[in-house]
Image: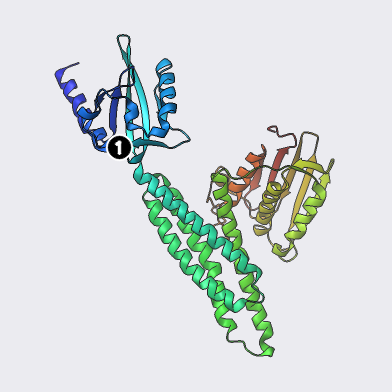
């Protein structure tokens, strides 16, 4: 290596923004760079020759010593802390969250390990802020659901609370946008969420506010029908809000791994008839849902997750089909698995859009003017994955869509 190469390496070591610490085969610190000195608030002379555990909180010492010995016996370049938090200890005893990457080399018979350390305190603060925003959003969702059950007898009170909820939601959206903008890797999710939330939340809330304002103008008994029409508009708008919030909350629970399987034995035919009946209020004029069942209707699966899948698919079929259209639901069961197929004659999906259908927030180009969050199929796919199932979609633009869900009864991948 030339003197110029050596100078470059020394400059990289001295000016690196990551902390760099070299330890010998006994776990003793031999070299530290200035970034590491600043990070842990030590001068090099204070820690060189000391065990690396000096820079690790006391509660992790015994476990770290075991891991260090294991690494020295089977060294490999790797990133530490996957799936768990790591902390470093500064000279004053305070702790900082860190990310650590390890590499090694041998000089003669002695092993040397290089640790590259990044202080992620700022990132952790952003994550905490985002968690707080999610908790606030969940609280508002819970409040809105509770208010929905009281709407018929507390319309005037409900309207005032919804106005406050709108203000809080707009403020929460601004704060969430500020937090998301600080993380480059979340920029795409941020822009999609802001766009959909702005459109999907404002439309039903504007309906609620305008109808609530008009209600105060109809004070006589003769105007009861006008009051009833505006109350119904408010109900529909709030139901729409609940659907949107359910999508966001479902996605949050899926991302956090909080969805568990609870299989039970139930009758598929009765189950599907109940769902079809439940979806009738959403059907357009003249639409018909036709159900047929082939095979033994007794299933063993998670009824709640399956209901979420079928209701989402059936709602899509209703939404994207015209009046007087038929929607076919066909089921087929065997000992190992069961299939549920939902076919409509609606607007269909363009071929170039089909590969993106299960992406979060994706909307087909022919559906951008139709209400929805773009989360439905993404959530359905995630639920099907939890049940070890698969989803197949066949669609022709302008002719309709057929979605087939295949789920094993034994828990094995179909």
Horizontally, residue 126 falls left or right of residue 301, namely left
* Residue 179 placement, left or right of 334: left
**Which residue is at the front of the view, 49 or 288?**
49
Q: Going by the picture, which residue comes out furthest to the left?
A: 3
Image: 249 above or below 338 = below
Q: Residue lying furthest right in this view? A: 296
Q: In the picture, which quadrant includes the C terminus?
A: top right
Residue 50 seen in render: yes
Q: Disc count in the image?
A: 1
Q: Secondary structure at mark 1?
A: loop
State the image coordinates of residue 369 (x, y, percent, origin top left): 55, 61
Q: Residue at x 29, y 27 (%)?
A: 21
Q: Which quadrant holds residue 391?
A: top right
- Pick whichever, 15 or 4, lies toward us: 15
Kindly identify the residue that appears in the image at 54 percent across and 77 percent down: 210
- Farthest residue to the top: give it: 108
Above or below, 65 against 254 in this view is above
Rendered residue at 45%/57% (across/down): 194
The picture places residue 311, in percent across and down from the top left corner, at 69, 53
From the viewer's side, name the closer residue of 227 and 95.
Answer: 95
Left/right placement of residue 179 relative to residue 366 reads left
Point out the image quarter for the N terminus: top left
Instruction: Quadrant for residue 331, please give it.
Output: top right
**Which coloring applies here?**
rainbow
How dense is the environment of label 1, judged by Cα within 10 Å: few (below 14), some, or many (20 and up)?
Answer: some
Q: From this viewpoint, is residue 369 visible?
A: no
Read off the residue under disc 1: 90
x, y percent for residue 294:
83, 43
Q: Is residue 54 above or below residue 394?
A: above
């Amino acid at each position: 290596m030339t003197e110029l190469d050596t100078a470059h390496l020394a400059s990289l070591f001295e000016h690196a923004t990551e902390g760099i610490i070299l330890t010998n085969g006994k776990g003793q610190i031999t070299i530290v760079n200035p970034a590491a000195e600043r990070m842990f608030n030590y001068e090099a002379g204070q820690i060189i020759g000391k065990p690396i555990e000096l820079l690790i909180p006391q509660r992790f010492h015994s476990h770290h010593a075991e891991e260090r010995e294991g690494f020295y016996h089977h060294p490999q370049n790797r990133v530490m802390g996957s799936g768990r938090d790591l902390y470093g200890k500064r000279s004053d005893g305070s702790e900082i969250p860190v990310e650590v990457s390890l590499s090694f080399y041998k000089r003669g018979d002695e092993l040397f390990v290089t640790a590259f350390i990044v202080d992620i305190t700022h990132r952790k603060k952003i994550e905490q802020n985002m968690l707080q925003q999610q908790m606030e959003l969940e609280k508002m969702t819970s409040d809105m659901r509770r208010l929905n059950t009281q709407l018929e007898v507390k319309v005037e009170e409900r309207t005032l609370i919804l106005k406050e909820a709108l203000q809080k939601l707009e403020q929460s959206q601004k704060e969430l946008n500020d937090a998301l903008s600080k993380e480059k890797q979340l920029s795409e999710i941020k822009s999609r969420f802001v766009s959909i939330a702005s459109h999907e939340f404002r439309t039903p809330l504007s309906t609620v506010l305008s109808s609530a304002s008009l209600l105060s103008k109809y004070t006589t008994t003769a105007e009861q029908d006008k009051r009833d029409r505006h109350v119904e508009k408010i109900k529909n708008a709030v139901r729409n809000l609940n659907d949107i919030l359910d999508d966001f909350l479902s996605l949050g629970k899926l991302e956090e791994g909080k969805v568990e399987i609870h299989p039970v034995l139930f009758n598929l035919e009765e189950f599907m008839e109940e769902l079809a009946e439940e979806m009738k209020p959403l059907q357009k004029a003249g639409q018909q849902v036709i159900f047929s069942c082939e095979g033994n209707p007794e299933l063993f699966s998670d009824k709640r997750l399956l209901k979420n899948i079928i209701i989402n698919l059936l709602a899509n079929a209703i939404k994207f089909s015209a009046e007087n259209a038929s929607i076919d639901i066909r089921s087929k069961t065997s000992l190992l698995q069961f299939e549920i197929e939902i076919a409509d004659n609606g607007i269909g999906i363009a071929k170039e859009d089909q590969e993106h259908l299960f992406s979060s927030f994706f909307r087909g180009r022919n559906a951008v003017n139709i209400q929805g969050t773009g989360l439905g199929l993404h959530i359905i796919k995630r639920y099907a994955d939890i049940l070890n199932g698969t989803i197949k979609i066949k669609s022709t633009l302008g002719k309709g869509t057929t979605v087939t869900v295949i789920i094993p009864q034994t828990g094995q991948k179909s």
